[in-house]
Image (spheres, rainbow, N blue to C red):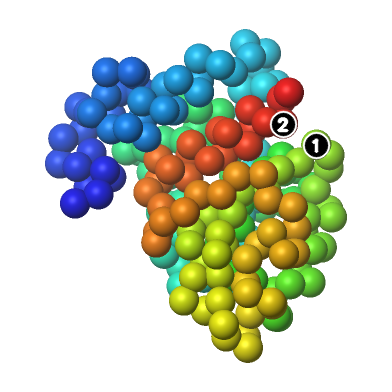
Amino acid sequence: MNEFHALLKNPKTDKISKDSDSKVIREIAELLKKRSLSPFARSITVRMIDCGSSNDVEIEEGLANSPQVDCERFGVHFTASPRHADVLLVSGPVSVNMKRALEKTYAAMPSPKAVVAAGDGAVSGGLFSKSSAVYKSGRVEEVVPVAIRVPGNPPTPYALVLGILKAGLALSK
């Protein structure tokens, strides 16, 4: 049973504190202490792009927006426009057909910007790394610079939030 399913069984463990049973939640609590008190440093706008995933990461991203995880309480907001985004969350191995869309989305983002590769497909190419349908090995870093890698098949919603917060922290420096 993964950490998220344990949280569903006992929602009282979802305290963002150093006393949480979840290692990821304890890490989020530590990261939140390091953030600047400026309201601008506490707001991270994310644009997600699926470059060829099996939609497992997208399901977990949806759960990050759910009332249980509620990523908005950490200042993480999702947008439909890359022109409003600080962080680009990329899932799946980069398919040949999505390479150009990824490049254009990244180029449309204002600076400073960061990319989070989410899931095994985005980080390493996953099962499709040797497929002719993916660009090179399918790793996102072969197309755009990646600041944070969140491995997992799929990563938990809290792991995604932690990756986004780390990228936001890197942007505020």
Tell me the amino acid under the disc marked 1. Pro
Residue type marked 2: Leu
Above-or-below relation of 114 to 139: above
Q: Is residue 77 above or below residue 156?
A: above
Q: Name which residue lies at 48% across and 62% down.
A: 120
Asked whether the beta carbons under mark 1 and mark 2 sit within 8 Å of each other, the answer is yes
Cα distance between the residues tagged 1 and 2: 6 Å
**x, y percentage for residue 143?**
75, 64
Q: Which mark is residue 171?
A: 2
Closer to the camera in the image, 74 or 169: 169
* Residue 8 visible in this rendered orientation of the protein: no
Q: Secondary structure at mark 1?
A: loop
Q: Residue furthest top?
A: 37
Q: Residues within 10 Å of mark 1 (few under 14, many from 20)?
A: few
Crowding at dot 2, Cα within 10 Å, few <14 / some 14-19 / many 20+, comes out as some
33 in relation to 101, above or below = above
Image quarter hosting the C terminus: top right
Closer to the chain start, of discs 1 and 2, is 1
- Residue 107 percent coordinates (x, y): 84, 55
Q: Residue at x 63, y 37 (%)?
A: 167
The quarter of the picture where residue 38 lies is top right
Residue carrying label 1: 112
Q: Residue at x 48, y 36 (%)?
A: 162
Q: Secondary structure at mark 2?
A: helix
Residue 50 percent coordinates (x, y): 59, 65
Q: Is residue 24 left or right of residue 95?
A: left
